[in-house]
Amino acid sequence: MIPDVDKRSWVEVDLDVIINNYRIYKSHMPNDAQIMAVVKADAYGHGDIEVASCLNNEGVRLFAVSNIKEAIRLRNKGINGEILILGYTPLRSAKLLKEYDITQALLDDNYADILKDYAESNTKVQFAIDTGMNRIGLDADDVAKCEKIIRKNSNRFNLNGLFTHLCVADDFSDESIKFTKQQINKFKQVTESIADLELPYIHCLNSAGGLYTDCQYEGINRIVRLGIVLYGLKPDRSNTLPEGIRPALQWKSVVSMIKTVHTGESIGYGRSYKATHDMIIATIPTGYADGYNRLLSNKGYVLINGAKAPIVGRICMDQFMIDVSNIGEVHIGNEVVLLGSQGDISFDADDMAELIDTIGYEIVCDISKRVPRFYSNL
Ligand SMILES: *Cc1c(COP(=O)(O)O)cnc(C)c1O
């Protein structure tokens, strides 16, 4: 039940849908393959503790986050298994890695050299390998150098893995497929050079990478770092997801006021919308401070009365206006779906992203902390 006081702008997350998405994705993988659940950025806005807890119950033992604060939060809430930090940890916080049994990514040899002076001995680490994204990692083009650096650090730390990141696995053009295979090949060469270390966690696939059926069965592809598909969204709008995977999050608001706006009057800041006929306008108490993107001004729409109502005028910090002239009777307090479905129609984060030329990831990550999250099946 959602308390009345929260019925301004709120998110509903269906954890059963997340578990179902996980099971469906896993059913397409070999039996001995594993999923590392990527729950960074508050599980892409879905709630990291809630998502990680239900996946922990489902048997997931591997988690990835972006930073040490996120990792400690999970540990403090009783998440067990391995937690990998995919990015930078400030040196002064490095002592906490061991204390909380967290695995740190080594970003390159310089970072490893400095980190060893700050971290406890035997801190768990995994080396990032750069196979073409040019973000973090040892340059895979020089396999011999990679090998040397990896071996040196396996004596300093508790090195338990290597990983790389694919940067065009969501695109199936010939050129991108070629690049992805090249990335995987480069990674493979590095892993083979240190095969004798028998590192347990060797991984290179993200959600999109795991959709390549011919990638999944190689030795280095036994772990998929699954992010966006867990939440039911697509890595790229051109992708098709396995049957049954669907968005877990709905974002809702209500109608706060209804009025008639006459021909020639304008609506909102900057007077960017002018009424060409008498219109019935409803105000919605959600705005860009809630993470409702301002680029949706005069562009987006919401679902109300089982129909689509277009946004008119600019999105304000805390409110915006919609045209409800053509969708039957509307009353104060009526529920409005900003993301999700109503009746037969749906509008998810990927649909919204398409309107404003971004990706579903950004839409869900941007829903601000002011918007309370409610869970079914906790
Ligand atoms: C965010 C991230 C992922 C998850 O990517 P999705 O596209 O959401 O599956 C995997 N690996 C790394 C290194 C990441 O930063």
Image (tube, rainbow, N blue to C red):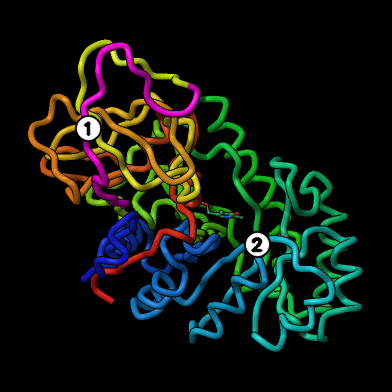
Residue 242 location, x and y as percent? Answer: 29, 47
Asked if marks 2 and 1 touch (Cβ < 8 Å), the reply is no
Mark closer to the observer (2, 1):
1
Residue 348 location, x and y as percent? Answer: 31, 42
Observer-nearest of 186 and 130? 130
Residue 183 location, x and y as percent? Answer: 64, 43
- In magenta, the rendered stretch is 251-270
- Give the residue at x 39% y 73%: 50
Q: Is mark 2 within 8 Å of ligand 1?
A: yes
- Give the residue at x 80% y 48%: 139
Instruction: Identify the secondary structure beneath mark 2.
Output: loop
Dot 1 alpha-carbon crowd within 10 angstroms: few under 14, some 14 to 19, many 20 or more:
few
Which numbered dot is residue 353? none
Instruction: Identify the secondary structure beneath mark 1.
Output: strand
- Amino acid identity at mark 1: Lys
Give the mark nearer the N terminus: 2 vs 1.
Answer: 2
Q: Distance between the residues labelled 2 and 1?
A: 50 Å
Identify whether 193 is placed above or below 91. Answer: above
Residue 14 location, x and y as percent? Answer: 27, 63
- The answer, for residue 62, to whether it is visible in the render is yes
The quarter in which the C terminus is drawn is bottom left
Image-based side of 159 in relation to 273, left or right: right
- Magenta-span inclusion, residue 334: no
Which residue is label 1 attached to? 259
Q: Is mark 1 within 8 Å of ligand 1?
A: no
- Give the residue at x 47% y 69%: 48
Residue 146, quarter of picture: bottom right
Observer-nearest of 276 and 106? 276
Residue 20, quarter of picture: bottom left
Which numbered dot is residue 86? 2
- Give the residue at x 55% y 83%: 75
Identify whether 187 is placed above or below 117. Answer: above
